[in-house]
Image (cartoon, helix red, strand yellow):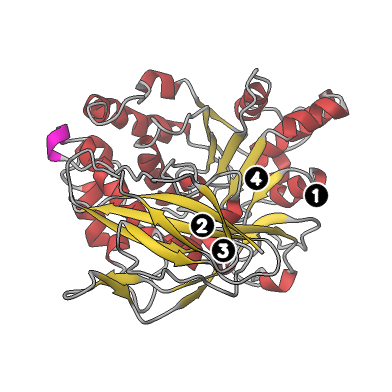
C-alpha cells in the first residue's frame, strides 16, 4: 500500500497515521506521500509524518513483543516523500513530476504481481501525475498492464484531479463516494447514530484508550477537530481479519461495502460540502455506495446471551459503522501493545471452521456451520455469532435464518427452496472476553442448487 495524505489539513490524517502504524506488520507499506488537497492547497507537510514515525520508533520494541513483522523506523522514514505544493490539476502535466509521483511509478514497475493499493486521504493529484507520465512514456499495452495493478480507495474527491483520473483511465479500479461528504460511506466511522451506543467514538473513550497513558505514539494522536479519522476507512479493509476480501469491495468489511455501478448525480449530494471541488456526473462505473439493512445484536442478561436489538438500520453508512465497535476495540488493544507486556494485553481470537469455506447444498436441504476448532491465544472465553449477510449473496431480499441459537459454536441451517443456483454468504463472528474485547471472522459461502 502507498498512502497519499494531506496531513496538517485536519488532525484526522495524523490520527489515521497513528492507527496505521500499529498495522504495518500486516500491511506492507511502500510509500507515505505528503500531498495537498482542497483543504490545504499550497503546502505539504512530510515533517509531520516523520514526527509520528519518531514516536513509533520508541514503542516498536514493545509492539514486537506482541506480533512479528514491524519494520524499523528507519525503513518507514525511507518511504516518506512529497507531491508538489500545488492544488489539483495545477500539479498535473509536462514538467510536473514530484518525488511522490515518481515513487508511484517506481513501485508499479517493480517485478511484483501483487496489486498496489493507493490509499488517498487528501487530493489524488500525485497519482494523477504518475498516470499522466505513464501515458506519455509507455506503450498502450504496458500502460494497461501497470494501471491494472492499481487499486484506489480515496476519501471523497478532495481535488479536481479525481474526476480527471476516472475519465482518462476508465478501467482503473477506483473506490470512492463522489460528491458532497454527506453522501459518503466513510462518514460512518465518526457519525453519531441515534439508537445505538456510540461510546467508542467519544472523546472520552479516545482519551482513555488512545491518547493518555499509552506512550509516545498515543500522545501523538491529536484531539478531534471536525471528525474522528475520516481517512481510516481508506485502508481498513486491508486488515486481514477474516471478513473482507479487498479485491471484492461488494463483500463488505471494516472499511465499508461498495458496489460497481455508475452513480446518478442526484444521489451524490451535489450541493453538499466538498470544500469547493466541483461535483461532476460520473462517466463510468466505480466502486461506490452500497446499502445494508442491519439489526444490531446486543447482550442479554438472562437466557440466550445475545439477542436482536429490535431496531433495524438502513443505508450506506451502515456498511461501515456496523463493525465500528470491533475495529475501535482492535485499535485500543494495539495501543495497549505499545506499553504493556504480552501477558498483560489482549490478542485476537483465532476462528477456525470444521468444514471448507465454500460448501454446496441442495434446495431446501439442511446443513451445519461449525467453528469448534476456534481458540484464543490468551486462553480467553469465546463468544460466537453466526448470521447471513444477504446483501452480499444472490438473494438480498430473502435473508436466511439460522435455525438454531445463533450464538452456538455449531449451528443448524435450512437452505431456501430455489429453482436456480444461488450463492449465500454466512459470517462467523468470534469475540473473546479479554479487555478490550477483540473480534475476528470467517466467511462461509454456500452454493444452493435446485
Residue that label 1 marks: 167
Residue that label 3 marks: 184
For the record, the magenta segment spans 340-344
**In the image, which is nearer the foreground, mark 3 or mark 4?**
3
- The quadrant in which residue 403 appears is bottom left
Q: Using the numbered discs, state the Cα–Cα distance from disc 2 to disc 3 in whole angstroms.
A: 10 Å
Does dot 2 land on a helix, a strand or a loop? loop
Asked whether disc 3 touches disc 4, contact meaning CB atoms under 8 Å apart, the reply is no
| Upstream in sequence: badge 2 or badge 1 | 1
Does dot 1 land on a helix, a strand or a loop? helix
| Upstream in sequence: badge 4 or badge 2 | 4
Left or right: residue 99 versus residue 238 is: right
Q: Which mark is residue 87?
A: 4
- The quadrant in which residue 204 appears is bottom left
445 drawn magenta? no
| Upstream in sequence: badge 2 or badge 3 | 3
Residue that label 2 marks: 256
Amino acid at each position: 500500500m502507498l498512502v497519499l495524505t494531506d496531513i496538517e489539513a485536519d488532525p484526522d490524517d495524523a490520527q489515521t497515521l497513528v492507527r496505521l502504524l500499529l498495522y504495518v506488520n500486516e500491511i506492507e507499506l511502500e510509500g507515505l506521500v505528503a500531498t495537498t488537497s482542497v483543504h490545504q492547497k499550497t503546502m505539504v507537510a512530510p515533517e509531520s509524518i516523520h514526527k509520528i514515525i519518531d514516536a513509533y520508533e520508541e514503542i516498536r520494541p514493545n509492539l514486537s513483543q506482541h506480533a512479528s513483522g514491524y519494520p524499523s523506523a528507519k525503513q518507514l522514514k525511507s518511504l516518506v516523500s512529497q507531491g508538489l505544493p500545488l492544488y489539483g490539476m495545477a500539479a498535473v502535466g509536462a514538467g510536473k513530476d514530484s518525488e511522490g509521483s515518481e515513487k508511484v511509478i517506481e513501485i508499479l514497475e517493480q517485478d511484483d504481481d501483487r496489486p498496489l493499493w493507493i490509499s488517498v486521504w487528501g487530493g489524488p493529484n500525485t497519482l494523477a501525475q504518475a498516470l499522466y507520465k505513464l501515458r506519455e512514456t509507455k506503450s498502450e499495452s504496458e500502460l494497461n498492464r501497470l494501471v491494472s495493478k492499481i487499486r484506489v480507495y480515496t476519501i471523497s474527491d478532495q481535488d479536481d484531479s479525481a474526476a480527471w483520473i476516472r475519465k482518462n483511465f476508465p478501467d482503473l479500479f477506483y473506490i470512492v463516494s463522489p460528491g458532497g461528504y454527506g453522501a459518503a460511506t466513510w462518514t460512518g466511522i465518526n457519525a453519531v447514530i441515534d439508537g445505538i451506543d456510540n461510546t467508542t467514538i467519544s472523546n472520552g473513550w479516545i482519551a482513555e484508550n488512545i491518547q493518555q497513558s499509552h506512550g509516545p505514539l498515543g500522545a501523538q494522536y491529536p484531539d478531534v477537530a471536525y471528525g474522528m479519522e475520516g481517512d481510516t476507512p481508506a485502508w481498513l479493509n486491508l486488515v486481514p481479519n477474516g471478513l473482507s476480501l479487498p479485491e471484492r469491495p461488494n463483500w463488505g468489511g471494516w472499511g465499508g461495502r461498495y458496489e460497481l455501478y455508475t452513480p446518478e448525480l442526484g444521489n451524490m449530494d451535489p450541493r453538499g460540502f466538498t470544500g469547493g471541488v466541483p461535483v461532476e456526473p460520473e462517466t463510468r462505473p466505480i466502486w461506490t455506495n452500497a446499502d445494508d439493512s442491519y439489526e444490531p445484536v446486543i447482550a442479554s442478561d438472562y437466557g440466550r446471551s445475545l439477542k436482536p436489538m429490535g431496531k433495524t438500520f438502513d443505508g450506506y453508512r451502515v456498511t461501515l459503522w456496523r463493525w465500528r465497535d470491533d475495529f475501535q476495540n482492535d485499535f485500543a488493544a494495539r495501543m495497549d501493545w505499545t506499553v504493556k507486556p504480552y501477558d498483560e494485553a489482549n490478542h485476537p481470537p483465532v476462528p477456525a471452521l470444521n468444514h471448507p469455506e465454500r460448501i454446496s447444498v441442495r434446495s431446501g436441504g439442511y446443513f451445519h456451520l461449525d467453528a469448534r476448532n476456534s481458540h484464543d491465544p490468551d486462553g480467553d472465553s469465546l463468544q460466537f455469532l453466526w448470521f447471513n449477510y444477504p446483501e452480499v449473496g444472490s438473494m438480498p431480499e430473502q435473508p436466511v435464518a439460522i435455525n438454531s441459537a445463533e450464538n452456538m459454536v455449531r449451528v443448524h441451517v435450512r437452505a431456501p427452496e430455489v429453482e436456480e443456483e444461488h450463492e449465500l454468504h454466512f459470517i462467523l463472528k468470534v469475540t473473546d472476553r479479554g479487555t478490550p474485547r477483540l473480534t475476528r471472522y470467517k466467511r462461509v459461502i454456500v452454493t444452493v442448487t435446485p
